[in-house]
Amino acid sequence: MTTVAERPTQSTPSGSDRKAVNWRAQLGLLALLAALTAAGTLAEWAWLVATLLGLGYSVAMVGADLVARRFGTDLLATLALAGSLLVGEYLAGALIALMLATGQVLEGYAQRRAHRDLDALLDRTPRFAQVRRDGAVATVPVAEVVVGEVVLVRTGEVVPVDGRLVEPGTFDESALTGESLPVHRPDGDAVRSGVCNAGAAVAVYATRTAAESAYAGVVRLAETALAETAPVARIADRFAVVFVPVALILAGAAWWWSGEAVRAVAVLVTATPCPLLLAVPVAITAGMSATARRGVVVKDGGALERLGQVRTAILDKTGTVTAGAPRVTDVITAPGQDPRLALAWAAAVEHGSPHVLATAVVAAAHRMDAPAMTAGRVVEEPGVGARGVVDGQPVSVGRLETSPDRSPAWVRSAIRRAELDAVGLIWVHVAGRPIAALLVRDEIRPEAARTLARLRAAGLRRLVLVTGDRREVADDVARILGLDEVIAEATPEAKVDQVRLEQRHAPTLAVGDGINDAPALAAADVGVAVAARAATATSEVADAVLTDGRIDRLADAVETARHARAVAVQSAAVGIGLSLLAMAAAAAGLLAPAGGALVQEVIDVLAIGTALRALPGPRRTRLPAHTQALIARFRAEHTDLLETRAAVRRAADALSGGLTAAVETDVRAAHTLVTDRLLPHERAEETQLYPALAAHVGGSDGTAPMSRGHAEIERLAARLSRHLAAPTPLRPDQLDDLRATLYGLDAVLTLHFAQEEQAYFTLADPD
């Protein structure tokens, strides 16, 4: 037999249609059971009719294989049924027909179980939205919501379009991310369509239409996944190429050796490869369901199988291995200026601007707890920046307004640092004078390094970064992540060329989020779109979508695909192995055709049960709730300590201009922050977080390198304290060592924080 999921010219029904198909199979099964339990002369006729019906179905399946130019295993079932008729073994023929009907029922159950997570995505798709129009709330079809409208999402409702929160909200994002706990998001935060409002009613400012929103692309992919499961039988076909000839040769040999045609029929009956035809598609479809639970929707079984075979990954940079949005990483100020006050001025002017850099400035002011200020007479100048009046002072934010050659030394130093770090600069001017420079970069995702390590562990041998960004920026990212090759300043055509080049050597995966990535994703063996930022065109051509935009879902998908493929092969191998044993017994005359059919039915059940092992996916160790809470606490403290780290760097920079009273004030302020805020944090990590994580990172040996980092931070802090122990002013002979100590502490903190965020904080479930 061949199942619906294996027909290249058919599609798998979804929802109620699949239930209807399964009910028809169940009715057929009941009719066959009735035929088998008939008595007397009626029984012979009932068995004959059942055999003829089974033969008709089997011939139809063989015909479908021939039309599709496939070498199908239905041939064995057809020959077994025809042989049963020729030798008068009508009971055996009826049992084979029962086997085919049972297979349909078992497959229907397995497919419904495996498709459950994909159905859930479709069932929760919102059809209507509550929109504020003309001072009232109107109910409109989701397709009619336009960008700029405010959508009201009540408790328990699904967010219909991508947008930004007008007010804080709490959301259940489990359908997209698998995260079971509600996620609280502040006002102004981006919220994706498809998440469920788990708190009070909230207003959402629509930033995309429903058709362009992230969830729409996921739904389209889920619909495709439910309708296009035909390619999952490629593993079965490879088995069939060997199995079918072996079965025919063994049947012929048994007939020739014994002179009894009934033995050949018995061999063919036991060879009817239902384990092969059912176990493989069930395992692959179960794998698709497992990936859906992990936040990845795969288009079809063929894509999942290819995903389990990739050996090379081509990765976009912006939005894929990086966050995809600029972030203020440091504030360099003119001597005597307060960085928090500079950020407050800048945020006041940029507040309300839709520009991505303005968003970064406002977010930085919020993180640094800068005082809230209001700007008036704000004017935006495209390509230049924005200006306004804050506390009676003219403030501008954007490009440097003076020539670097005529600027103070600190300005030239900031420009040089930005060039060396390959980052952008946002200048803050007050009354026409530069008072601060904000360093901006698109930071590497904290989970990127661990994700790439997992991909290598899963069997990928080559990881290539292909980006349209500058060479120096791409090189820095590649060095940090340990990528094998970098292609910078690449056009969409160059990305496609690189995909084709890699495909000559190994199956290739391409990952991206922008419109310029769509051609490369289409050309690759498997294209994966990062849905949180993916353009509609990118999601359309992709074979899989990371529904919550976290790059570690890519590793989840590859691991799950490999697991599902392994289970499919194992299930087919177990079923075929048992079938071969039964065939040998039938060839030796130990199994009659009817007995062989019953044995094969038992093998069917065992093979499908084995295939369903793919449904949970590979084992995944989750951290205890207490440990996850600790990680959340210390991750938040890392954000709070940004001001302390910035103070250490500013003090070191200030010492380059010599010792003055103002510089000494900066140094002592940095020392106070280190003593009062940084060291208690590091000591709490050592005594609370690291013991809780030890069991998950290889014991105390796994945390030893990070503990050594704590010791070095303590050593440098103590050295700084000795410098400042005397109440008298600092001496010139202390300058060089004091500056080295502060720069050393800054370097160690930068590395240590990055290591913790990549190695430890990413172990927790996503927010």
Image (cartoon, helix red, strand yellow):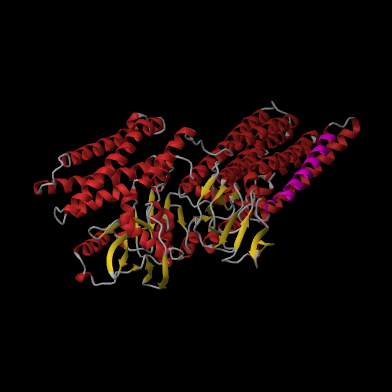
Residue 656 place in picture, x, y as percent: 16, 55
Q: Nearer the viewer, residue 307 or 274?
A: 307
- Name the image quarter holding residue 98: top right
Residue 33 sits inside the magenta stretch: yes
Q: Residue furthest left?
A: 733
Residue appearing at x 64%, y 54% in the figure: 223
Q: In the image, 215: left or right of 427? A: right
Residue 497 visible somewhere in the drawing:
no
Residue 614 visible somewhere in the drawing:
yes
Residue 708 place in picture, x, y as percent: 27, 35
Residue 259 sits inside the magenta stretch: no
- Name the image quarter holding residue 601: top right
Residue 27 place in picture, x, y as percent: 81, 41
Q: In the image, 37: left or right of 232? A: right
- What secondary structure predominates along the stretch shown in magenta? helix
Q: In the image, 455: left or right of 434? A: right
Tell me the magenta residue range: 11-34
Q: Residue furthest front?
A: 392
Q: Quadrant of the N terminus?
A: top right
Residue 335 place in picture, x, y as percent: 22, 59
Residue appearing at x 78%, y 43% in the figure: 23
